[in-house]
Amino acid sequence: MTRANHHLLDLVGKTPVARIDTALPHPHGGFWAKLECLSAGGMKARSAVAMLLAARARGDLAPGAAVVESTSGTLGIGLVFAGQALGHPVILVVDAELEPSMRALLRCHGARLEIVDRPHPVGGWQQARLDRLQAVRRELPRCFWPDQYNNPDNPSGYTDLARELVEQLGQADVLVCSVGTGGHSAGTIATLRRYWPRLRLIGVDTIGSTIFGQPARSRIMRGLGSSIYPRNVAYDEFDEVHWVGPVEVVDACRRLARDCFVTGGWSTGAVALVAAWVARVEAGASVVTVFPDGPHRYLGTIFDDDFCQARGLFGPAADRPVEIGHAESVEVTGWARCRSVTVPSRALGVPA
């Protein structure tokens, strides 16, 4: 039986906001960033705790039972935090591209790792991890699978994040969110629009992600994007979506690190880039975004010169998005923007 440390739950959330006015790459009017890296377990500890508590309340998660989940890393940290707080061992299905530092961190917090060594021919690493996960579930019939991509308790974990923003900012015009499972964008906007009904939501995805209707391609960036269609993505709530590439994100992360100290990984750089662009083109708008994590996981990637040089990530970086009329009308290969957000045809079972 894993020991429960309920006092850890007091360390989740209550994160500060920072005013960001670093040129990204151009000067802009500034935006607010909620620094989830300063919460124990990072941003996804909120959803991890919410999913496990709800499962326990329903009787789906027995006391001391194992929790098994697929992750590219960030939710894994949240789950090992929630597992320690609530007394559950955690088994994480990861893939061979997960950084060695993140593997070490997950293991030092007590997680058992199941490592997938090759991507699925259609669904990529994500589908390969899900296939291995089902095998683990068959071995451990009493374990609980949160299913972060489709679990409605995932978005509900961000209610407090939204309420904190209301208390901290009083008012905002635009919310910029990275999109992976769809949890934090769906949960945050649902609560914020009760207070700020006219708040606009801009989603930020990566090129090569299928979430908003683009074809699946190999992706360098982890933590945002998907090669499947998570049911937690609240398509109807988005006013527009941006796809960004790794060159632009590396540039943004490094500019943040040099100029205002506050920085992070792929998702952080992506939302910072788009939030800064909005703040520049919509003078006077109050723009807020969420920085999901800090830089430490990315010292061997984003902040490693050899890694970036070998992959051509030092530029040139686009300084504005190209606008397209519909997400499925053209394949984007760099920073692009679409103001028509619909459920992708393939997510509805319609052939392309």
Image (cartoon, rainbow, N blue to C red):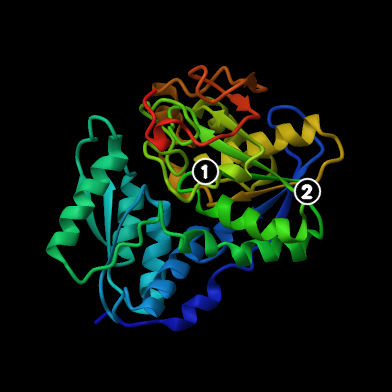
In the picture as drawn, the residue positioned furthest to the left comes out as: 139
Categorize mark 1 by other alpha carbons within 10 Å: few (<14), some (14-19), many (20+). many
Mark 1 lies on residue: 179
Q: Would you say residue 94 is visible in this rendering? A: yes
- Residue 163 x, y percent position in the rendering: 69, 65
Name the amino acid, label 1: Val
Labelled disc at residue 198: 2
For label 2, the SS is loop
Is residue 200 shown above or below 69? Answer: above
Is residue 349 rendered to the left or right of residue 23? left
Is residue 150 rendered to the left or right of residue 290? left
- Residue 85 x, y percent position in the rendering: 41, 76
Labelled disc at residue 336: none
Labels 1, 2: front one: 2
Is residue 70 rendered to the left or right of residue 45? left
In the picture as drawn, the residue positioned furthest to the right comes out as: 284
Is residue 128 shown above or below 249? Answer: below
